[in-house]
Image (cartoon, rainbow, N blue to C red):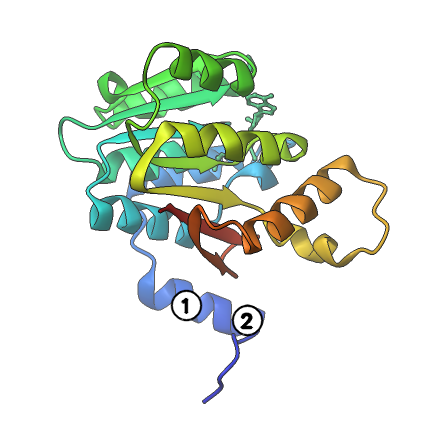
Amino acid sequence: MTNRTLKLDDDLYRYLLEVSLRETPLLKRLRDETAQLANAQWQIAPEQGQFMALLVRLSGARRIIEVGTFTGYSALCMAQAMPADGRLICCDIPGDYNATAERYWREAGLAGCIEQRLAPALETLAALEAAGQAGSFDLIFIDADKANYPAYFEHALGLVRQGGLILFDNTLWSGRVLEQHPDSVDTRAIQALNRALKDDARIDLSLLPLGDGLTLCRKR
Ligand SMILES: C[S@@+](CC[C@H](N)C(=O)[O-])C[C@H]1O[C@@H](n2cnc3c(N)ncnc32)[C@H](O)[C@@H]1O
């Protein structure tokens, strides 16, 4: 037994997947296809997708925003867990991978529930606010350009309802959050976000060592 979070070696990680991962054949196929791409490491881990699907089911989230969609794996995990009248808005910029996402969502029968908005996410989030949708979302998952994480947080706080969830991916950033004087703007932004969240009285907070670090914020 241990009273600190366990370090997973390869064998223990394999075991975890073996006894708990329930990935559908379609999600597995999408993961295999994405694995052929140069930026395959952008995709979340399958156990993280399963956890996020559980969060969607636990919270009954019906209105969801994703910031950073890539080939659509995390979006599909969440969309499959939404109720039948659920809606997911996916923010990304134009790229070859947008079409891959749409293809898998269609195959899952979920294309009608997912809307992809191809523009810088800060613009899309501002447009949603301007359209009077502040406070109307149940869950927002943020997994795009890290330099904008602090700005995404402020938009997300405005768009999510009280009691709603904001999730940030990559908040442990492969350990680079420990760097003392990082050159990378992305690393500095994640460090700044993590520090700011710790003392932010507007949210309840937990940082899970799942995947590359998944931070959960519940809007108070
Ligand atoms: C880490 S990937 C997302 C992975 C995805 N959540 C998954 O699990 O497959 C980050 C995505 O953010 C997108 N992105 C980068 N900068 C962006 C911006 N300013 N606005 C919207 N999307 C952006 C990239 O095009 C990329 O698809």
Residue 75 shown left or right of residue 196 in the figure? left
**What's the residue at 45%, 89% (across, down)?**
1
Q: Is residue 85 left or right of residue 31?
A: left
Q: Amino acid at mark 1?
A: Leu
Q: Quadrant of residue 144?
A: top right
Q: Residue furthest left?
A: 84
Q: Secondary structure at mark 2?
A: loop
Ligand 1's quadrant: top right
Is residue 69 shown above or below 189?
A: above
The percent coordinates of residue 76 (x first, y second) are: 33, 33
Question: Neighbour class for label 1 at 10 Å: few (<14), some, many (≥20)?
Answer: few
Q: Which mark is first along the chain, 1 or 2? A: 2
Q: Position of residue 146 (x, y in %)?
A: 64, 35
As displayed, is residue 152 above or below residue 173? above
Residue shown at the point (35%, 39%) measured from the top left: 27
Q: Which residue is mark 1?
A: 16
Residue at position x 45%, y 55% in the image: 205
**Residue 138 or residue 107, whichever sits in front:** 138
Q: Secondary structure at mark 1?
A: helix
**Point 51% across, 27% down: residue:** 70
Crowd band around label 2 with a 10 angstrom C-alpha radius: few (<14), some (14–19), many (20+) = few
User: Dividing the picture into quarters, in which one does residue 190 lie?
Assistant: top right
Disc 2 under 8 Å from ligand 1? The reply is no
On residue 8, the disc is 2
Regarding residue 68, the answer to whether it shows in the image is no
Q: Which is nearer the eye, 32 or 151?
A: 151
In the rendering, at what x and y percent does residue 118 appear? 49, 12
Q: Position of residue 201 (x, y in %)?
A: 47, 50
Q: Do callouts 2 and 1 mark residues in contact (Cβ within 8 Å)? A: yes
Residue situated in front as seen by the camera: 197 or 106: 197
Disc 1 Cβ-to-ligand 1 distance below 8 Å: no
